[in-house]
Image (cartoon, rainbow, N blue to C red):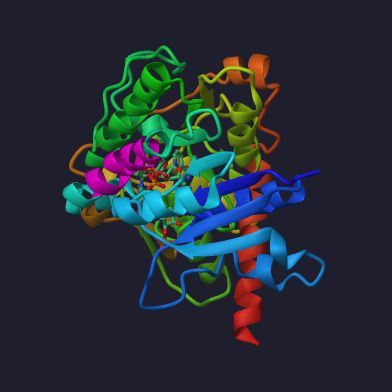
Amino acid sequence: MKKKTALIFGVTGQDGSYLAEFLIKKGYLVHGVKRRSSSFNTGRIDHIYQDPFANKKNFFLHYGDVTDAISVSSLIKKIKPAEIYNLAAQSHVSVSFEVPEYTANADAVGALRILEAIKFHGFEKLTKFYQAGTSEMFGKVQEVPQTEKTAFYPRSPYGVAKVYAHWITINYREAYNIFACNGILFNHESPRRGETFVTRKIVIALCKIKLGLQDKLYLGNLEAKRDWGHAKDYVDAMWRMLQKKTPDDYVIATGKQFSVKQFVNLVLKELNIKFKWKGKGISSKCYTESGKCIVACDKEYYRPLEVDTLLGNPNKAKKELNWKAKTNIQNLVSDMVSSELRSLDKNAL
Ligand code: NDP
Ligand code: GDR
């Protein structure tokens, strides 16, 4: 039987790497798009090549960029994918305040470029499209918990760009009958999470503090609340959306919420570090039993606007996709901490 072909924009990122593994296991031929960079950016996917048991002909990499319409269009024409996953984005909310125009170009118009290429090549019936939408579109939340029907109120250039991508996906679905779905994914983390997102930043720093390799961790708003899941579970939901009879939009979340401070506490407990918090807000500090301050706040890590609280309602995904988050916060923390300790140990050798 002919293998299905998938094309992943953003294959070198956290989700792209898990999705590539997931699709290869399902028997797909997976094509991934990577950007030219001055140093290696394929660390998360190198093992897919190196695995001696994997059929190397299942995975192909191409240079491209979602800000470059010609490369997007040529790749789609050449590969003729049955499924396209658009995970490519400048995905850091805080950075989007520093580079708003680029963020709009990649995160908003990037989705349009892919959809337009599908239409331009007449692939409306051949190619299904997944758009990596985000809970950041809810921003200043209008309803708790958030569902597919909750109104958007984005609070960053990133969130605003993703709202455009969400609506252009619906627009191409309705105007041209393209099988196009929006995932509205809440935060998902893993040992492969970028080092500047808060969960990974906390895990790396506290593991180093435990091993005596670092003194202190500086954070921003400790009171922000997020619905945190595991990236491995979430790429499965992306795939399920494209296997349905009709295209639709789905919230993907755990339905549970924790603050940044609670996440710090969970990591400290996992590392068997006894601690005590003192102070409030930006003056909050966390001390060890021996009185050493190991966590403090710095205004550098506060944002011009904050999304205070996000909590997803994944009922539609459960009912229609038979999808449920398998990993709870405790298991997520354990996975991230044990992987970090292993890698620090390896680097020390
Ligand atoms: P990452 O930041 O880890 O990965 C982003 C990927 O996009 C990387 O492969 C990056 O390449 C690539 N990329 C960035 N700009 C371009 C560009 N101009 N052209 C082509 N590729 C580009 O993000 P995640 O894996 O965490 O997230 C995947 C997607 O899901 C993103 O769109 C994100 O916005 C969205 N999302 C993520 C959530 C999360 O909690 N993780 C929640 C909801 C949505 P490079 O490696 O070279 O930087
Ligand atoms: P977020 O993730 O903005 O939700 O976007 P991030 O981990 O960056 O922040 C979560 C919350 O933690 C607060 N915070 C800090 N954040 C960072 N990065 N660094 C700090 O030092 C720090 N201290 C406190 C933040 O203010 C925020 O409230 C992620 C990205 O993956 C997006 O691409 C995705 O769309 C959303 O999740 C869902």
Is residue 139 placed above or below 300 in the rendered structure?
above
Q: Quadrant of ligand 2?
A: top left
Pick whichever, 73 or 10, lies toward us: 73
In x, y percent, where is residue 243? 65, 28
The C terminus appears in which quarter of the rendering?
A: bottom right
Is residue 186 placed above or below 153 in the rendered structure?
below
The verdict on residue 113 being magenta is yes
Left/right placement of residue 218 relative to residue 47 reads left
Query: Does any portion of residue 285 appear in the rendered image?
Result: no
Which residue does the image show at 23% across and 43% down from the upper left?
104
In x, y percent, where is residue 128? 54, 33
Q: Mostly what secondary structure, the magenta segment?
A: helix
The N terminus appears in which quarter of the rendering?
A: top right
Left/right placement of residue 239 relative to residue 146 reads right
Query: Does any portion of residue 105 appear in the rendered image?
Result: yes
The verdict on residue 99 being magenta is no
Is residue 13 placed above or below 139 in the rendered structure?
below
In x, y percent, where is residue 6? 60, 46
Residue lying farthest to the front in this orientation: 122
Which segment is the magenta one? 103-117
